[in-house]
Image (cartoon, coloured by chain):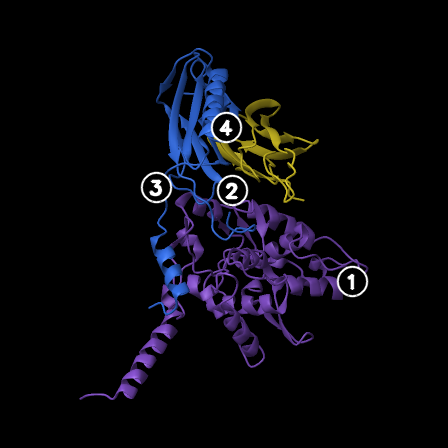
Chain colours: A purple, B yellow, C blue
Amino acid sequence: MSFSAGVRFLLLAAACFISARALTAEIPLGERRSGYELMARETRAIQDDDATNPGMLWVLDGEALWNKKAGAADRSCADCHGDARESMKAVAARYPAFDTARGRPVNLEQRINGCRTGRQKAAPLAYESKDLLALSAYVARQSHGLPIRVTIDERTRPFLAAGKETFHRRQGQLNLSCALCHDDNWGKHLAGSVIPQAHPTGYPLYRLEWQGLGSLGRRLRNCLTGMRAQAPELGSDEFVDLELYLMWRAREMKIETPAVRP
Amino acid sequence: MARAVVTMPAQAKRGEIIEIKTLAQHPMETGFRRTQTGELIPRDIIRRFTCTYNGVEVYRADLHPAIAANPLIAFTTIATETGTLTFQWVGDNGYTVTEIAPIRVE
Amino acid sequence: MPTTRREFLIFAAVSLAAPAAAEAQLDPNLAASRKAAFQEALRRVVGDAQVRRGRVKLQLPPLIDNGNSVPLSVAVESPMTAADHVKAIHVLTEKNPLPDVVSVALGPRAGRASLATRVRLADTQTVTAIAQMSDGSFWSDSAEVVVTLSACLEEGLI
């Protein structure tokens, strides 16, 4: 059977289109791996042992803050939430979550600040401040070992779509997208490091490069700077939507907070 | 605030070698880094770590800028008698942290 | 298949970017002065005594994730009795800005002569651990480490 030039062109175009689509395909659920598995045995050992994991210093600070009264209301987190080991179990694993008052998803840091301003009548904690990192590390720690389960329903679906679009959008001077490295080329080398799949299973985490604990937002800003793209502000809608997409992309993977990463 | 954390058993048999792991929260600024405008950030490190067991020094480490931030120091000691282990970190700019851990030795 | 030139270049760069052979990046003059500093530090520790290889086991990951924080452990074979024990453990480097890393003072109370910590390594290099015994002898071990640069740094690629 022979095809006309027009039909051949259409078939060729279709083939290109299909391969271009396959180029940025999601990682099959069964092939997803935490960045933990790419690290040296010795670095993994640091994360696994609470006695050697430097992130635990922040978790302990967070525990102290949890019990400390604050603000005009003179309330501690514990006054409302009791023992975090009970009340905060699986909480971080479902963030970002829809916030009715704001009409959009908020991440854990924003939820904590919501309580600070709304319930404790205290000033919000600055993004990447020691106290906010410590509190979010302590709260997220209570989800350690639990599966990530963000709620996607008619309320959050549009924001998930926005986050997915950001993940696939080419940006910056190198015209790269997150997907190009983290969906299509994970496992290969870039500048001496192995490209991870980029699942936010362990945030806030201790990054050896930072020599300290940092949030997902900080890590995303590093990525975008590395891509020579404009990095949004911490807590911006674009970032929280992206965080929602990343957490959905990592659904059912286990929380590792506080993780250790190169 | 958790300035330092010590992990060790609370009790041991007499003569048993126990493992002690310590973590201190400290940037260990080397003195070799520069700001964006090129100014040298002055050195600020933990200089000395000591462990005393009922008043007797059993382990001492002199640290230099090559020790990573939030230093881990892990070592062993013999559980000789019931009492108190005192851990002290002393460093630049008046930094001093002390942690105490009791031990019961049978 | 890559459909634009940019995509092709990225694919090529990514697939060819195997970890570089373990060659140090340090300027040769700087390397020489730091090596001299290492020799001087070694002399400060052992004086004129001979340093023998053995009894000391220095462990470092051969290829490290990040030079800012490299797990290091030293263990020394010794009965750790009053008559025969390790008095001190020293760790030195040959390419860091300063050769000294850590010096530990210990004795029979330690039970085992050991240290575990995390160190900063400025470049691919050899790290040396020296044990000073109660009888005045010195023993050592060395380990080679390959240090690479992380991608996607805060200040961007250097």
> Crowdedness of circle 2 by 10 Å Cα count: few (<14), some, many (20+)?
many
**SS for dot 2:** loop
Q: Give the residue type that dot 3 points to.
A: Ala
Disc 3: which residue: C21
> Crowdedness of circle 3 by 10 Å Cα count: few (<14), some, many (20+)?
few
Q: Quadrant of the N terminus of chain B?
A: top right
Disc 1: which residue: A121
Q: Are marks 2 and 1 on the same chain?
A: yes
**SS for dot 4:** strand
Residue lying at the far left of the rendered structure: A1
Q: Closer to the camera: disc 4 or disc 3?
A: 3
Q: Residue at x 40, y 70 (%)?
A: A24
The x, y position of residue C69, in whole percent, is: 50, 40
Residue lying at the far right of the rendered structure: A72
Residue A125 vertical position relative to residue B63 in the rendered view, above or below: below
The x, y position of residue C50, in whole percent, is: 39, 13
Q: Residue at x 57, y 75 (%)?
A: A159
Instruction: State whether residue C96 appears in this view.
Output: yes
Mark 4 belongs to chain:
B
Closest to the observer, C23 or A12: A12
Mark 2 belongs to chain:
A
The disc placed on residue C155 is none
